[in-house]
Amino acid sequence: MTDKVRNYKIAIVGAGPAGYFTAHAFQKAQSDYLSFSIDMIERLPTPWGLVRSGVAPDHPKIKTVSNVFEKIARDPSFRLFANVELGKDVSLKDLRDQYDVVVLATGAARARKLGIPGEELKNSLSAAEFVPWYNAHPDFVNVEVDLSSDTAVVIGVGNVAMDVARILAIDPSTLETTDIAEHALIKLKQSNIRKVLVYGRRGPEHAAFTAHELRDLTKLENTDVYIDSIQIKEAIKHIEEMDEVEKDLKNNIIAMKAITEHKKKNAVRKIEIKFLSTPIEVKGAGKVEEIVFQRNKIENGKVVANNGKFSIKAGLIITAIGYDSAEYPGVTIENGRIRNIAGHVEHNVYVVGWAKHGPVGVIGTNKSDSTYVVDLIIKNLRDPKTSEGLTALLKSGHEVIDQTAWEKINASEVVSGEISGKPRIKEVDWIQLIRLGKSR
Ligand code: NAP
């Protein structure tokens, strides 16, 4: 590096995929003239965001991206400050003053609501509660999940709905070698649920599933998956009439057709994917007992009611209909996202990932998006500030989980898992996580 090197202090808030890929984009942009000191701030005592608390336990391959995150974290330009909450331990204004750039990578953790009567009944849950519950997120350990009925209903036909349906429907013994939360595995082993009905309000051609995930459904060992073959035939006809068909849509429909043709095992465990049905009421005496649907048809591309109502007896409903960004002091939420123009929020504050563009795309999507925002940030850089950064802002004695502390937690979880043939056993208790991080 030459004397002319300019070092900028970057605060990235949120240690999920968008945060790490942003850090990586800054690292890649360093040159003889430009360097970055990156502080990643995370509310939880553990990093990795949805890779830890979102990705389904039976999808271990997707989680290997954490190796990439750890490589990014070991670069000398990077420091982790986990167990530090924006809005509580540190304000956005303070970060703005101390850092040259603040990048919000805080995701979208708040469940969207159906807004129908009965949605607040017991055992009416959202994927935003159920998924972190089975993934050992410390804030969701005590979510009450009652699996005593034989039928569960999942609303939404995206990949999160599919994860939820799979976890409910598959034989829990197949989850024993995964990193699923111990409390969830115990509950799933006692579960009476044998039928999981997944409902979309539009047709198969509008489903948000991806083909890879659909194809995996035919590989389930002890669970049969059903999709209405007439609806799939109609969808095929529909796309054949289209002038141009997107590759992803075509692949999805082919994958759904394969499910209809796939030989069933007469398994007791079933997932049934249904379309053109909108939930309009959840009924029950204090707890979910029945879900009322309106049948739909698509007219001029819009969902319209058609052919009356029907109802399903079920003791559990889980909505997987998307997420909004959570509010915290200093940001404005607009259409479920942090208000921004192409990633710029205001002053020296930027946003990336789901907090920027909403809950769409897979983990890898964050790579190009973060690079795009970092390019914009670099174009807008002025003279570097001289400031102390986060350490000057935190109260003395604040228990920061830094990279070294996190590596201790990580190693301890992996070692606990090895004994039981699992990739790791996740610690769910916040205080215990901090203890592990501070252990010698
Ligand atoms: P999503 O893909 O946007 O799917 C949301 C679903 O909810 C859609 O079917 C949507 O139907 C439906 N919906 C929305 N509002 C509704 C309402 N009021 N009533 C009934 N249905 C409603 O969202 P997601 O499943 O939460 O996934 C988020 C992102 O994470 C996606 O990009 C997904 O691919 C990704 N992800 C990937 C994986 C993986 O790669 N294995 C796993 C999980 C998640 P409409 O289309 O009709 O609005």
Image (cartoon, grey):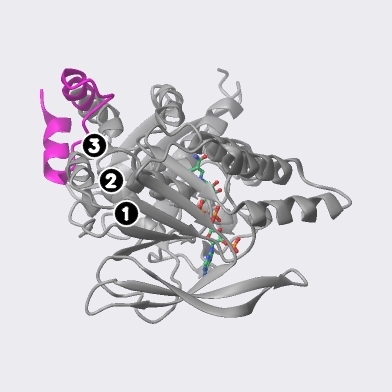
Of the two numbered discs 2 and 3 on the same chain, state the one appearing first in sequence. 2
Instruction: Give the quarter of the image for residue 206.
Output: bottom right
Amino acid type, mark 1:
Phe
Q: Residue at left 23%, top 45%?
A: 188
On screen, 43 above or below 217?
A: below
Q: Are marks 1 and 2 in contact (CB under 8 Å)?
A: yes
Q: In which quadrant of the rendered image does the C terminus lie?
A: top left
Q: Secondary structure at mark 3?
A: loop
Instruction: Please tell me whether mark 2 or mark 3 is closer to you in this view.
Output: 2
Distance between mark 3 and mark 1 Cα atoms:
26 Å
In the foreground, 327 or 125: 125
In the foreground, 82 or 398: 82
Q: In which quadrant of the rendered image does the N terminus lie?
A: top right
**The label number, if any, that marks residue 130 in the structure image:** 1
Question: Which residue has dot 2 on it?
Answer: 134
In the rendering, at what x and y percent does residue 157 appear?
53, 55
Of the two numbered discs 3 and 1 on the same chain, state the one appearing first in sequence. 1
Q: Secondary structure at mark 1?
A: helix
Q: Are marks 2 and 3 in contact (CB under 8 Å)?
A: no
Question: Which residue has dot 3 on it?
Answer: 401
In the rendering, at what x and y percent does residue 315 appear?
29, 65
Q: Residue at left 31%, top 75%?
A: 120
Residue closest to the far right = 243
Position of 268 with respect to 71 (left or right) is left
Label 1 C-beta lies within 8 Å of the nearest ligand 1 atom: no
Q: Residue at left 27%, top 66%?
A: 123
In the foreground, 254 or 53: 254
Instruction: Give the quarter of the image for residue 375.
Output: top right
Q: Which residues are magenta?
A: 413-440
Amino acid type, mark 3:
Ile
